[in-house]
Structures are given as structure tokens and as C-alpha cells.
Image (cartoon, grey):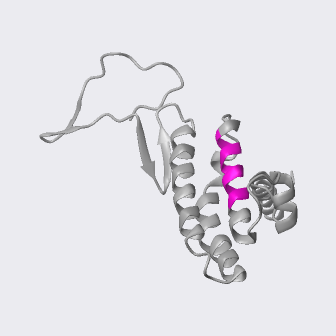
């Protein structure tokens, strides 16, 4: 993959290692994050949204479990898989995709607390006493700055 903000040339010559040709790709998965040739996070967030929705399907099928167990499942298994790498992709310019993740986060609260579908997201999160994904992002950024400051990296 060639990484560039500019348009790539039409004729890219193949690269060989021995007799094998290296295939050109427009995106690649690395350490659980999808990176594209323009360094946008759109492909990653689209995959994340799809994965998040599937995991909420599992949560929905777990209605027979007590609320505290479903909430533990969400916060200990599902949410960490969604917020993995949040500090990198959380500042992406595609706010529509981020908002769709926020809606899925609210959907999880509705499922766990058996709240109506027409209840406003703000009210859902308030009733559940959950922060938004945006707050998780800001906390992650703040945590990095605190760590950098405590090791003296930002003190000068």
C-alpha cells in the first residue's frame, strides 16, 4: 500500500520479492485497526460500526440474564472492543460515523435497562448513568497528557 494524501499515479509498477509479486491494496488491517491509503479512519469506523451492531445483537439475545450481568458483558467485553484505538480514530473528521457509534452505545443502554426506543439518547445515557463515547475519547486524550506530563515530557 502506498500511503499519500495526494492522488496516486495511475501506473504503479509491481514490486517483486523473489518470484512473488507484492499485491497493491487500498487498505490493510494492522493491530486490529484498518488503515487506508489516505490515512482516513472511514474504513475502520465502518467495520467497527458493523461489528458493534453484531455484538449488540448478542446482548439483545441475552435478555434472560440479570441486568448487572448484561451490563458487565457490555462494559468488560463489548465496549473495550469498540473503544480499542479510540485515541487514534476518535478525532476523525467523519462525525456522522462517530454519531452512529454513539447511537449504538445508546442502543446498548436501552437493551440493558429495557428503555423505550423513542426515548432521547441524552435521557437514555442519563438514566443509565453512562458517559458518551465522546467523553471516553476526551478522557483517553487527557490520560495521555497526564502520563506525558508526569514523566516530564511536557514539563519543559
Residue 85: give x, y in percent of width and height.
Answer: 61, 55
Asked if one can make out residue 46 in the rendered structure from this viewpoint, the answer is: yes
Given residues 72 and 13, the one toward you in this image is: 72
Looking at the rendered image, the quarter that the N terminus falls into is top left
Q: Is residue 20 left or right of residue 76?
A: left
Q: Characterize the magenta stretch by its predominant secondary structure.
A: helix
Q: Nearer the viewer, residue 108 or 76?
A: 108
Note whether 67 is above or below 92 in the view shown: below
Q: Is residue 154 visible?
A: no
- How many numbered circles are shown? 0
Left/right placement of residue 78 relative to residue 27 reads: right
Q: Is residue 89 magenta?
A: no
The residue lying toward the viewer, choosing from 133 and 92, is 133
Residue at (74% x, 68% y) in the render: 114
Residue 102 magenta:
yes
Looking at the image, which residue is at 35% across and 36% down? Answer: 25
Residue at (87, 62) in percent of width and height: 126
**Image x and y of residue 147, in percent:** 78, 63
The percent coordinates of residue 51 (x first, y second) are 52, 56
Is residue 62 found left or right of 35 in the rendered image?
right
Rendered view: 118 above or below 11: below
| Name of the residue lying farthest toward the left | 19
Query: Residue 64, image x and y in percent?
Result: 60, 81
Residue at the far top: name it. Answer: 10
The structure residue drawn at horizontal position 76% and vertical position 60%, both measured from the top left corner, is: 116
Instruction: Using the image, determine if residue 96 lies above or below residue 156.
Output: above
Span of residues in magenta:
97-107
Amino acid at each position: 500500500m502506498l500511503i499519500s494524501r495526494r492522488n496516486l499515479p495511475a501506473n504503479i509498477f509491481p514490486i517483486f520479492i523473489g518470484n512473488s509479486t507484492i499485491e497493491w491494496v487500498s487498505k490493510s488491517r494492522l493491530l486490529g485497526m484498518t488503515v487506508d491509503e489516505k490515512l482516513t479512519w472511514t474504513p475502520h469506523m465502518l467495520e467497527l460500526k458493523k461489528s458493534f451492531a453484531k455484538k449488540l445483537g448478542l446482548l439483545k439475545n441475552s435478555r434472560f440474564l440479570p441486568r448487572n450481568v448484561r451490563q458487565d458483558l457490555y462494559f468488560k467485553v463489548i465496549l473495550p472492543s469498540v473503544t480499542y484505538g479510540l485515541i487514534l480514530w476518535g478525532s476523525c473528521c467523519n462525525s456522522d460515523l462517530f454519531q452512529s457509534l454513539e447511537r449504538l452505545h445508546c442502543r446498548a443502554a436501552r437493551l440493558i435497562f429495557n428503555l423505550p426506543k423513542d426515548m432521547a439518547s441524552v435521557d437514555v445515557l442519563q438514566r443509565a448513568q453512562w458517559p458518551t463515547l465522546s467523553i471516553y475519547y476526551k478522557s483517553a486524550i487527557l490520560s495521555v497528557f497526564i502520563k506525558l506530563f508526569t514523566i516530564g515530557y511536557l514539563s519543559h
